[in-house]
Image (spheres, helix red, strand yellow):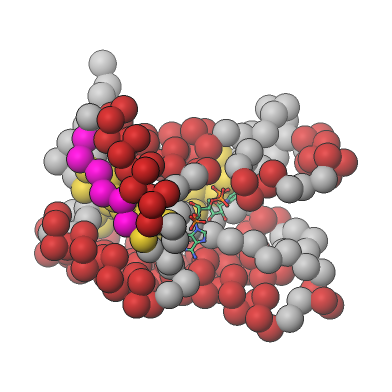
Amino acid sequence: MFCIDLSKRTALVTGSTRGIGRAVAEFLARAGARVAVTGRDLSRAQEVAKEIAQSCGVETLGLALDVGDHSSIREAYARVEELWGGVDVLVNNAGITRDKLFLRMGVEDWEEVLRVNLTGTFLMTSLAVKGMLKNRWGRVVNLSSVVGFTGNVGQVNYASTKSALIGFTKSLAKELASRNITVNAVAPGFIETDMTASLKEELRQEYLKNIPLGRFGKPEDVAGAVLFLCSPLADYITGEVLHVNGGMY
Ligand SMILES: NC(=O)c1ccc[n+]([C@@H]2O[C@H](COP(=O)([O-])OP(=O)(O)OC[C@H]3O[C@@H](n4cnc5c(N)ncnc54)[C@H](OP(=O)(O)O)[C@@H]3O)[C@@H](O)[C@H]2O)c1
């Protein structure tokens, strides 16, 4: 019987107070990892960390971490280092949308999405890989999106960051492979979370028609793919993109 055992590992998941990030934090904890649950709201992060600790029987930590803010990233990571000496697994999950048609998109909509989705991933990873390099073991998983491959109306800013994360993933994978650090991406399709909750019913039905498996994804569908990439089953996979989209792309 296969059993994924991450009990000697420490993980940090950005944006793990809800949605996909929360499911990822839970799956890693169920595999035995110590997990830092993070988000912009400290009390929410602490509450979710406590719930995961109780349900999975592992040590967790709830931290305020805004990936759009350099000092918040530094402070949160310093706390993890102080308590746990760093992380073995980093999941760059936090992401935002600021959807607008291109002709209405202001530079502030562009810059905010780049700062959170792309620069946030760069800064988080820069800090986390230092310890991984020393330990000669690490797993980095970046959350891209199907729209980074297909493009999408109203998402020039968001889709650009999700494509860029693929270049980031593939390049960093090459740089870090000799130290036994793998860097992979997961590209979800349409997943039922707060991010997609506000979409109009008509548009949802339109998307559904293009999903061969006939349903929207659940956060757990994505969490399974992330857990796989962090597990020993994926030790020989790096620079790869795992599409989790019910067959739509
Ligand atoms: N849902 C989908 O259909 C879908 C499809 C493809 C890709 N994705 C990607 O998957 C990832 C997770 O998406 P989701 O649907 O789970 O999103 P979500 O439901 O909107 O949750 C986003 C999470 O990120 C946190 N967050 C937001 N801004 C942040 C910031 N500046 N710094 C740190 N944390 C922040 C939120 O917590 P706080 O608000 O408390 O900070 C929350 O925990 C994103 O990268 C998204 O682009 C989602």
Q: x, y percentage for residue 44?
A: 42, 49
Q: Residue at x 72, y 27 (%)?
A: 214
**In the drawing, does residue 104 fall left or right of residue 92?**
right
Q: In this picture, is 39 found above or below 193? A: below
Q: x, y percentage for residue 35?
A: 27, 45
Look at the image and tell me whether residue 29 can be seen.
no
Q: Residue at x 31, y 27 (%)?
A: 55
Depth check, front residue: 125 or 80:
80
Depth check, front residue: 72 or 159:
72
Given the current orientation, which residue lies at the most extreme front position? 43
Given the current orientation, which residue lies at the most extreme top position? 1
Q: Residue at x 83, y 39 (%)?
A: 201
Depth check, front residue: 55 or 23:
55
**In the drawing, does residue 94 fall left or right of residue 175?**
right
Q: In this picture, is 201 found above or below 3? A: below
Decide whether residue 138 is among the magenta residues. no
Q: Quadrant of the N terminus?
A: top left
Depth check, front residue: 45 or 68:
45
When asked about the image quadrant of residue 90, the answer is bottom left
Q: Which residues are magenta?
A: 58-63
Q: Quadrant of the C terminus?
A: top right
Q: x, y percentage for residue 161?
A: 58, 67
When asked about the image quadrant of residue 231, the answer is top left
Given the current orientation, which residue lies at the most extreme right position? 202
Characterize the magenta stretch by its predominant secondary structure.
strand
Q: x, y percentage for residue 99?
A: 73, 64
Exactly how many numbered labels are in the figure? 0
When asked about the image quadrant of residue 34, the answer is top left
Look at the image and tell me whether residue 186 can be seen.
yes
Q: Residue at x 80, y 61 (%)?
A: 153
Q: In this picture, is 151 found above or below 35? A: below
